Amino acid sequence: MDFSQIIPSMPGLVDGMLMTLKLLALSVVGGVALGTVLALLRLSSNPLLSGFAKAYVNYFRSIPLLLVITWFYLAVPMLLNWITGTFVSVGAFTSCLVAFMMFEAAYYCEIVRAGIQSIAKGQENAAYALGMSYGQAMRLIILPQAFRKMMPLLLQQSIILFQDTSLVYAVGLMDFLNAARSKGDIVGLPHEFLIFAGAVYFVISFGASLSVKRLQKRFAV
Amino acid sequence: MSMISIKNVSKWYGDFQVLTDCTTDVKKGEVVVVCGPSGSGKSTLIKTVNALEPFQKGDIIVDGTSVGDAKTDLPKLRSRVGMVFQHFELFPHLSITENLTIAQERVLGRSKDEAMQKGLHYLDRVGLKAHAHKFPGQLSGGQQQRVAIARALAMDPIAMLFDEPTSALDPEMVNEVLDVMVELAQEGMTMMCVTHEMGFARKVANRVIFMDRGSIVEDCAKEEFFGNIEARSERARQFLSKILQH
């Protein structure tokens, strides 16, 4: 075992990690936003809207993420092409981002839905009684409380997503795992680099998981 | 002049009828107490007044506006009617001042300063100005309910609805809330109160409504309701004998 070659490869590995984190951050923001919209649709009294959201969630929770990533790699450029009528080059990053957002939204939707339902009906009534519209009641009263309650679950789901971003290897995006793998191949030490990558994933995921638990205890008080 | 006019209101949950042909009237400046056994529909009835509970038959007119009309701007109507809930329903993620000002600013479009001034004025009136910067969780139940009353008053309502405002309170906190309500009644606020506090009813109510199984069984002046018990219905006498015994 020779781990000394990892030091000179650091710049490439750091670039890979930055790509992973960028993908993660944007996917979480987009996924939570889309998931929140889906949750509101799902809780809507309109059967068409709630039916659509339910079908969306069930569909994306029943197919593999790797399938969505490879499928969107082909579908997103085609779709944009069809919409705009001109050829648009979107690249692996954008198509992966769209895939993660749409896939994760299905999971975030269920978390947000449970969060909204955990806020007592009386809070909604109080907001309405003060003359607030549905949008105001959600934005100002229900969602802020719901997000506080479900923060640990949202973070836990995001830690899983952090690991799952490594699937972008399938479409050739240079994330952290892909960077480690290719560097390892170049210097002829694939084992060492994969072990190192595993250690980094473990430290970040487990560390984040511990912080979430601590946060959960603090919020519970 | 009639402020709240409830006309033949009926409501069903599926096949189960919760309100049957309820008709009554609350005039401007009048204090009406609604009582009755639990499950009699009194909370449901009061919530139909500001459309928190929809109803299928009849109509309710609040200051000339029909609650049942699909074209009515319900948020606007609700912003003119104050409501106080059994479980206070202060917003726990907002400070007391934010609780007092958020609807003034977002719904009525008042400036921050105006809303704050108004909010603090009513907070002072319920005797809690010193707690302005706390959060609801730091206050006792009685204090929270007084803040909830101040929050409703800060909207300058034309009438106030109280839905069992003291039944979730520890006994020693009931009076601090009732005192605020009595003061309000004496100042001429139009009030509809679902409550079992017969002392409050005797003191300030103009009329008492007794409900049983979704219907209004008694609707008469306070003096008649308490003074002429023999003329009351069997159910009302039973109810009164149970709650007035002690």
Image (cartoon, coloured by chain):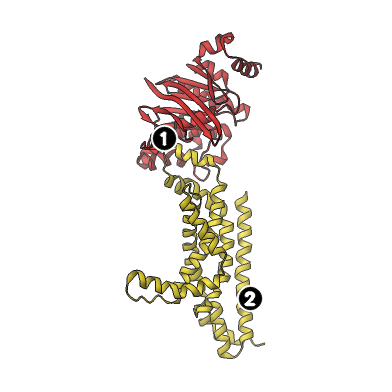
Chain colours: A yellow, B red
Q: Is residue B120 above or below residue A23?
A: above
**What SS does tag 2 mark?**
helix
Decide if residue A20 is on the left or right side of residue A213.
left
Residue B21 spot, x, y in % from top left: 49, 24
Q: Position of residue A2 (x, y in %)?
A: 65, 88
- Chain under numbered label 2: A
Query: Which mark, by number, is residue B141?
Result: none
Task: Report the residue at 60% width, 78% height from top.
Answer: A197
Q: Which residue is mark 2?
A: A199
* Mark 2 in CB contact with mark 1 (< 8 angstroms): no
Q: Is residue A180 left or right of residue B6?
A: right
Position of the C terminus of chain B, as image quadrant, is top right
- Callout 2: few (<14), some (14-19), or many (20+) C-alpha neighbours within 10 Å? few
Both marks 2 and 1 on one chain: no
Q: Is residue A118 left or right of residue A96?
A: right
Helix or strand or loop: what does disc 1 sit on?
Answer: helix
Q: Observer-nearest residue: B61 or A138? A: B61
**CA distance for labels 2 and 1:** 58 Å
Q: Chain of mark 1?
A: B
For residue B78, the mark is 1
Kind of residue sitting beneath label 1? Arg
- Going 55% across and 24% down the picture, which residue do you hit? B195
Task: Look at label 2 and name its amino acid.
Answer: Ala
Q: Position of residue B169 (x, y in %)?
A: 60, 30
- Please tell me which residue lies in front, A57 or A210: A57
Tally of numbered tags: 2
